[in-house]
Amino acid sequence: TDYYDMEQELNKCLEVIQKFQPDVILADGYYVTHSYLTELKKYAKLAYIDDIKSFAYPVDVLINYNSGAMEMNYPKLYQDSKTELPQLILGEHFVPLRQEFQNLKQKPVKSKVTDILFSAGGADPERIALRFAREVVHNEQLSGYKFHLVLGAFEPDVEEIKKLAEKHTQICIHQNVKKMSELMQQCDMAVSAAGSTLYELCACGMPTITYVLADNQKLGESSLCGKGVMKSAGDVRTKTGFWDDLMEMMYLLAENCEERQKMRESAVRTVDGMGAEHIIKNLMSSEGKDVS
């Protein structure tokens, strides 16, 4: 069926629901409609995963596991629309990470940084990875560090970055990484776009400098940085002097073992990697209390 028209799948969904008679239905998709959710809710306890607050969803449980979710003020949305407020499961405590990020053993913070991870996300629409590589190889302060660049499947500048890595041994390229947690834990700190990778870095206890490259990243970035979990280099698209500031921030954090230790402790307190289990526990409870 059409991804943008979820009501087309309703008949098939209802066949499956009537066959298996679930206790809970978990819905996810940016194109759900009021009538789609209303129909599903007739058959079981209905939970919906959200991060855009499109409308007052007619569900029993509303899940938003992004940092800053509590600032989205769902109670006001439901009050204004005169819709019953569902059970709320909000915040990064509920981020459902893959098994490799669960129950991780934290290594001690090294006094001297040697390896720095960099991630621009899967597509890198702003072409940040190449600019980052060019900046670090020409920065004398950062000449003693090895930079591990994680390149996504849609990275537009792979060949240019590979050419740069051939000339500069401090650039190491990683593609099609099978176990990201291991690569993260091999490094001492990270620089990452403010997407879902930040939650994985938290679970790994990784001191991280983040930056914004899309509008939907702003809330998560400001929330995590406001809690002292990470440091922000700002919006790469609009900030004057972004690159000079980022290079200086990296150097200062690499030189400050005490600050990196504090950031690690904040990160693992914020995301323990067990978010999926926390969600299920709440979905199966009959109390229906808000959990934030």
Image (spheres, helix red, strand yellow):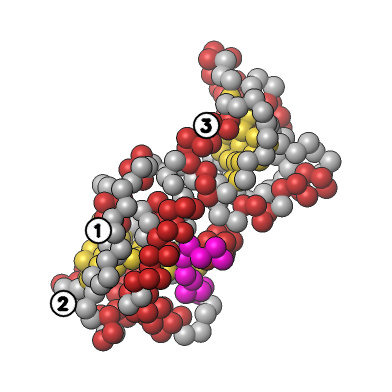
* Magenta highlight range: 226-237
Q: Eyeballing the image, is 203 above or below 26?
A: below
Q: Position of residue 100 (x, y in %)?
A: 33, 43
For disc 3, the marked residue is: 280
Q: Which numbered mark, 3 or 2, is in the foreground of this view?
A: 3
Under circle 1, the secondary element is helix
Name the residue tied to disc 2: 167
Q: Residues within 10 Å of mark 3 (few under 14, many from 20)?
A: few
Quadrant hosting residue 64:
top right
Judging from the image, what secondary structure is the residue with disc 3 in?
helix
In primary-sequence order, the first of circles 3 and 2 is 2
Looking at the rendering, which quadrant does residue 282 occupy?
A: top right
Q: Relative to residue 283, is residue 75 drawn left or right?
A: right
Q: How crowded is the residue under tag 1: few (<14 C-alpha within 10 Å), some, or many (20+)?
A: some
In contact (CB < 8 Å): disc 1 and disc 2: no
User: At which x and y percent is residue 56?
Assistant: 73, 42
Secondary structure beneath dot 2 equals helix
Inspect the magenta stretch and tell me whether residue 33 lies in it: no
In the image, taking residue 188 as reference, residue 193 lies left or right, namely right
| Residue 57 against residue 24 in the figure, above or below | below
- Asked if 63 appears above or below 22 in the picture, the reply is below
Q: List the residue tagged with mark 1.
A: 186
